[in-house]
Image: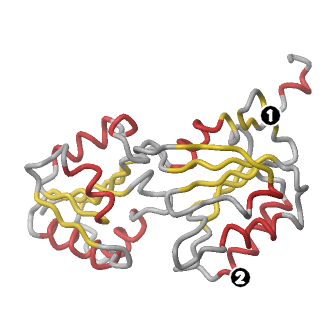
Amino acid sequence: MGKIYVVGIGPGGPGDTTPRVEAALAASDVLVGYTTYIQLVRERYPEKEIVATPMTTEVERCRACRELALGGKTVSMVCSGDAGVYGMAGLVHQVCRDFPELEIQVLPGVTAATAGAALLGAPLVHDFAAVSLSDALTPWETIARRLLLAAEGDFVLCLYNPASKKRPNTLRQAAELLLRRRAPDTPCGLARRIGREGEESWLCTLGELGEQPADMFTTVFVGNSQTQVVNGRLVTPRGYEGKGTL
């Protein structure tokens, strides 16, 4: 009986891959993953057997992991960011539910929320909510409801998958919803290609957010009522000011 590691390699660059994940990749016989993510690690492990599949084949990818492990291989399911945050960890467990004897170990990684926040400043220092704007697996009505409720709760928002070729207007729709609950001058930030070549980040307001260029490599941050721009950085206070310490 083999083993499945479900690993998050971070946002892209090797500097953001944890030592535990690197050790799992090195110990694996086979690396399995979405083609784009496999390309990020292939050069580091040229001797490994590779199984790369395109988008929308997630179930087949997990079944391949399962069969390889049942055949005695040690397998790493490679995810970007953190495997348990919009990653494959849950699906691997579901696909392997009838094989309780199969060892599965999920190893955490640096997700786009924390990596993008670090680029922009410190927007997630207080309570925040992460919402994916992709309606591939979740109805837009559900996404819209979650956005409005999170905005009403004054959470900082971290938006994953803000736009794609098939969804060019998703971020604009989200911004219009949020403007029902938040002021147009609410500070926002965007981080793109985090940890990879072409990395960039910039600030805007909620009133400007709907017109910002965004794609599947972009993570969007929407401040709450307390979020500020401090020396060009997006910062959400945690409340130290009220303690008389600042």
Front one among 49 and 206: 206
Res. 18 image quadrant:
top left
Which residue is labeled 1 in the image?
237
Residue 76 higher or lower than 67, as above or below: above
Amino acid carrying mark 1 in the image: Pro
Q: Is residue 137 left or right of residue 11?
A: right
Res. 131 image quadrant:
bottom right
Numbered circle sitting on residue 141: 2
The residue positioned farthest toward the top in the image shown: 245
- Please report the residue visible at 26 percent of the width from the left and 55 percent of the height from the top: 39
Figure quadrant of the C terminus: top right
- Please report the residue visible at 58 percent of the width from the left and 48 percent of the height from the top: 191
Q: How many marks?
A: 2
Residue 209: image location, x then y, percent: 74, 58
* Residue 137 seen in this snapshot: no
Element marked by disc 1: loop
Residue 61: image location, x then y, percent: 27, 73
Q: Residues within 10 Å of mark 2 (few under 14, many from 20)?
A: few
Q: Residues within 10 Å of mark 1 (few under 14, many from 20)?
A: some
- Please report the residue visible at 75 percent of the width from the left and 27 percent of the height from the top: 231
Figure quadrant of the N terminus: bottom left
Whichever of labels 2 and 1 marks the residue nearer the N terminus, that label is 2
Amino acid carrying mark 2 in the image: Glu
Residue 221 higher or lower than 244, as above or below: below
- Please report the residue visible at 53 percent of the width from the left and 50 percent of the height from the top: 192
Q: Is residue 242 left or right of residue 213?
A: right
